[in-house]
Amino acid sequence: MTGTWIELVINIIIILFLVIGAFITLSASIGIIRFPDIYTRLHAATKASTLGVAFILIGAFIYLYAKEGIISGKLLIGIIFIMITAPVSAHMIGRAAHHSGIKPITKNRTDAYEEAIQERN
């Protein structure tokens, strides 16, 4: 057996991060297709894919650090950028959709945002 046990453990950690990230991203894409309205599709598109991309970038960061000895600031900035911008953009798209008149599918729920708008006016 070539290599050390620590290399094996690092390889397993890298593989886990990449596989989990790919699975979460796959589930996000299935959610985009399966969910009924724009609001639930936005949830799938941003929450799950943000976490999936973050896992993949963390796996790439660990690989570069462990195998090449490189600390990639670009990957760290990419993780932070994705974590900040994707949820904020989804929130703004959701508000724009609601202001455009697209109502959420409400099964046994109330539209809390619509109630807040009516209370404010």
Image (cartoon, grey):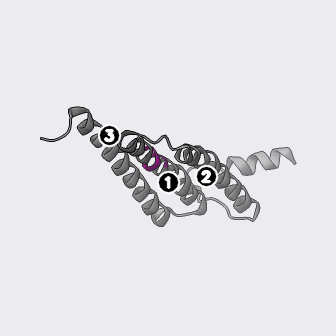
Neighbours of disc 2 within 10 Å: few (<14), some (14-19), many (20+): some
When asked about the image quadrant of residue 100, the answer is bottom right
Tag 1: residue type? Answer: Ser
Q: Secondary structure at mark 2?
A: helix
Q: Residue at x 71, y 59 (%)?
A: 98
Q: Left or right: 77 with respect to 61?
A: right
Mark 2–mark 1 distance (CA, rounded to whole Å): 9 Å
Tag 3: residue type? Answer: Ile
Give the camera-side residue of 77 and 113: 77
| Label number found at residue 6 | none
- Looking at the rendered structure, the number of numbered marks drawn on it comes to 3
Q: Earlier in the sequence, mark 3 or mark 1?
A: 3
| Label number found at residue 49 | 1
Give the camera-side residue of 118 and 28: 28
State which region is magenta: 54-58
Give how far across and how far down residue 68 sits, in percent.
39, 44
* CB within 8 Å, label 2 to label 1: yes
Q: Left or right: 38 with respect to 31?
A: right
Mark 2–mark 3 distance (CA, rounded to whole Å): 26 Å
